[in-house]
Amino acid sequence: MLEDSVEGFIARWRAHATDGVAFARAEGSPLLEVAVGDAVLQLFERTGPYDAPTGPVRLILHAVATRWSTADGGPPGLGAVGPASLRVEGRVVEREPPFVVVDAGAPVVLALESEDEPLAVPEIGAWLACETLAPAHGFVIRHGPARKPTVATDDLV
C-alpha cells in the first residue's frame, strides 16, 4: 500500500505541488487533462468528487514506475507517453523509499516498485528517467475559502 488516505498523501507531499491549467471535461469524469509546463497530461483525479475547476489549478503529480535508469541524461522533461502514462526525466530532489520526488521541470512524486530485483531507490541528486504505469494521478489542492454565491442568499428564495 502506497498511501493511507488521499488527505494523508496530500499532507505529506504538498510541498511538491505544481501549477497547471485544467481543461474542460465531462461532468463527473475522474480523468483530468491538465497542462503542466509544456506538457499536456491525462491524470486520474484522486481528489473527487471530480470537480476541479477549469483553468489554473495547483496539484501534486504522482505515478508509479517499475523500471527506471539513473544514467545522466539531457535536460529535465515531463511528457505523456500514452493515456495517463508519463515520461519523467530529471534529478531526484527528495527520497523516502519507495518514493522519490523528481524535478522534471515540475515535481513528480514517483513510487518505485521493482518487478524482479530488490528495490534500489536512487539517492538525492541522482538523475532518474522512466516511463510510468497508467494511471498517473493528480491530487488537486484547493486554496482559500469555499466559493461564495454571486447573489445574496435572500434573492435565491
Image (cartoon, grey):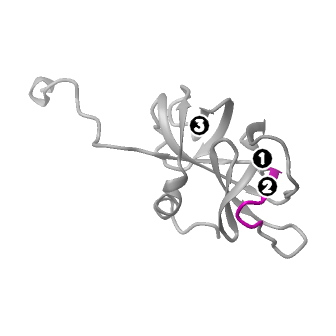
Q: Nearer the viewer, mark 2 or mark 3?
A: 2
Question: Which residue is drawn at the image coordinates 71% and 41% (left, top)?
Answer: 84
Which residue shows up at 45% across the image and 32% down it? 53
Amino acid of disc 1: Glu
Of tags 2 and 1, the one toward the viewer is 2
Question: Camera-side residue: 48 or 127?
Answer: 127
Q: Pointers 1 and 3 in contact (CB under 8 A)? A: no
Residue named by callout 1: 89
- Picture coordinates of residue 96, whole percent (x, y): 64, 70
**Residue in the image at 73% along x and 53% along y:** 91
Identify residue for label 3: 32
Marks 2 and 3 close (CB-CB < 8 Å): no
**Does the magenta-highlighted stretch encompass residue 149?**
no
Q: Is residue 7 visible?
A: yes
Measuring from the top left, give residue 125's x and y in whole percent. Answer: 72, 60
Tell me the kind of residue under disc 3. Leu
Residue type at tag 2: Trp
Q: Is residue 59 left or right of residue 1?
A: left
- Look at mark 2 in the image and give the residue it sits on: 127
User: Circle 3 sits in a helix, a strand or a loop, which is it?
Assistant: strand
Give the quarter of the image for residue 86. top right
Q: Position of residue 107 (x, y in %)?
A: 62, 48
Check whether the beta carbons of the residues at disc 2 and disc 1 lie within 8 A of each other: yes
Per the rendered image, the range of residues in magenta is 122-130
Q: Is residue 5 left or right of residue 133?
A: left
